[in-house]
Image (cartoon, rainbow, N blue to C red):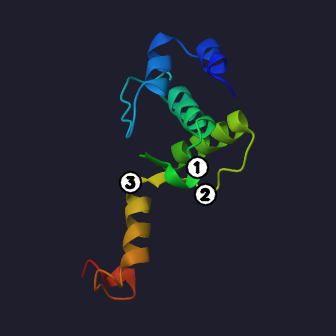
Amino acid sequence: MNLDYFKNILDDEQYKAVTESKGFSFIISSSGSGKTFTITHKIAYLIAQGTKPENIMLVTFTKASAKEMLNRTKHIVNDNINSLTSGTFHSIAYNIIKKYSSRLNLKKNTDEVFD
């Protein structure tokens, strides 16, 4: 996948968001403005540039949104990106706490963490 693909499919602002930012990206805009389209192409761009999917974290507000973005990204890159971390803010935080609970000296049953 080369840069021409992204130049041809994205408008100027989307192209800038996808290709110029380094490190973390935080995209805010109104409904119907192409956030999902831009974010999925950002992930595809990162993968095309050599970033491994396991080094990408996609955090959204709803499970449906995370699932939709993963499906769209899989379609764009035609590859297995199951190692990419994605989910809601709450589910990702819960999984981190669950995974590292012993290192944090938390009880084994994470349901008891917030007692």
Please report the residue visible at 33 percent of the width from the left and 82 percent of the height from the top.
103
Q: How far apart are the alpha carbons under marks 1 and 2?
A: 9 Å
Q: Seen from this angle, which residue lies furthest front?
A: 50
Residue 89 placement, left or right of 32: left
Please report the residue visible at 32 percent of the width from the left and 84 percent of the height from the top.
112
Counting from the top left corner in percent of width and height, residue 69 is at: 58, 40
Assess whether mark 2 and mark 1 are in contact (beta carbons under 8 angstroms). yes
Task: Give the residue type at disc 3.
Answer: Phe
User: Which residue in the structure is indicated by mark 3?
Assistant: 89
User: Which residue in the structure is indicated by mark 2?
Assistant: 83
Query: As displayed, is residue 80 above or below residue 105?
Result: above
Q: How far apart are the alpha carbons under marks 1 and 3?
A: 21 Å
SS of the residue at dot 2? loop
SS of the residue at dot 1? loop
Counting from the top left corner in percent of width and height, residue 76 is at: 69, 33
Q: Seen from this angle, which residue lies furthest bottom?
A: 108
